């Protein structure tokens, strides 16, 4: 299977209802083939903003997803950066998929794509081999559903490549939420109920 088709199919399996985008990105054609609706935005910044807003409204169930133009000196990614920074600051569990660069790919550019994206993401994953698509997508959705929310960025190399879908079949993943010990909660409630002048200092 082509790497882009694999990503589109996995998004469907994870319950993604649509993807916001700015038109030029190789995954978009795969989304069309898989029947995933796309919302075309005026630029990449708005594509991020719409996915971010959707994740905020739904609480990350389902996840808001966007695709933006990436690669070396990509104006789209530079425009999208502000939206990703806002999503990161506000703990929004959204997924952004874009073109990536391998090691040393930004040495002749003032804008270091990889380093910059890592500063505005809970997790950044560069799919260096097509057969790692299921692995990276599992990790991406697990990260968005586990612990403190935040945006996840997945990047693809310029050459998509093929992989054997049957060798590593994808299954939707679950997240893990941490919580207090039930006995501690019970003790806290008892203390509050018995207090004559209860005061809760939280934060």
Image: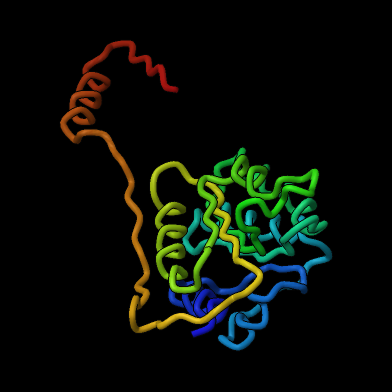
Horizontal relation, residue 71 to residue 52: left or right = right
Q: Residue 73 lies in what quarter of the image?
A: bottom right
Residue pictured at 55% horizontal, 42% vertical: 91
Q: Give x and y (percent) for residue 57.
A: 57, 55
Residue at 78% across / 49% down in the picture? Answer: 108
Residue 47, by quadrant, is bottom right
82 shown above or below 24: above
Q: Is residue 94 left or right of residue 144?
A: right
Q: Nearer the viewer, residue 192 or 102?
A: 102
Between residues 196 and 36, which one lies in front from this camera angle? Answer: 36
Q: How is the image coloured?
A: rainbow
Quarter location, residue 50:
bottom right
| Residue lying at the far left of the rendered structure | 183
Image x and y of residue 113, in percent = 69, 49
The front one of 71 and 27 is 71
Identify which residue is drawn at 77% across, 55% down.
45
Q: Position of residue 151 (x, y in %)?
A: 56, 50
Horizontal side of residue 137 vs 121, given as left or right: left
Q: Is residue 88 above or below residue 141?
A: above
Q: Depth check: 158 or 10 in front? A: 158
User: How many marks overall?
Assistant: 0
In the rendered image of this protein, does residue 163 appear above or below residue 137?
below
Q: Name the image quarter holding the C terminus.
A: top left
Residue at x 78% of width, y 51% of height: 78
């Amino acid at each position: 299977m082509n790497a882009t088709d694999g990503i589109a199919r996995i998004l469907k399996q994870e319950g993604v209802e649509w993807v916001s985008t700015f038109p030029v990105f190789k995954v978009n054609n795969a989304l069309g083939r898989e029947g995933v609706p796309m919302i075309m935005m005026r630029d990449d910044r708005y594509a991020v903003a719409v996915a971010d807003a959707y994740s905020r409204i739904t609480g990350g169930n389902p996840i808001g997803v966007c695709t933006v133009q990436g690669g070396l000196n990509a104006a789209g990614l530079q425009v999208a950066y502000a939206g990703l920074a806002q999503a990161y600051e506000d703990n929004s569990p959204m997924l952004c998929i874009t073109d990536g660069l391998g090691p040393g790919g930004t040495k002749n550019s003032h804008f270091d794509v990889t380093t910059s994206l890592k500063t505005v993401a809970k997790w950044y994953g560069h799919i260096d081999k097509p057969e790692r698509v299921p692995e990276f997508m599992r990790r991406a959705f697990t990260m968005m559903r586990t612990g403190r929310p935040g945006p996840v960025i997945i990047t693809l190399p310029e050459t998509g490549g093929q992989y054997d879908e049957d060798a590593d079949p994808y299954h939707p993943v679950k997240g893990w939420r941490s919580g207090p010990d039930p006995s501690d909660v019970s003790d806290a409630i008892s203390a509050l109920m018995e207090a004559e002048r209860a005061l809760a200092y939280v934060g």
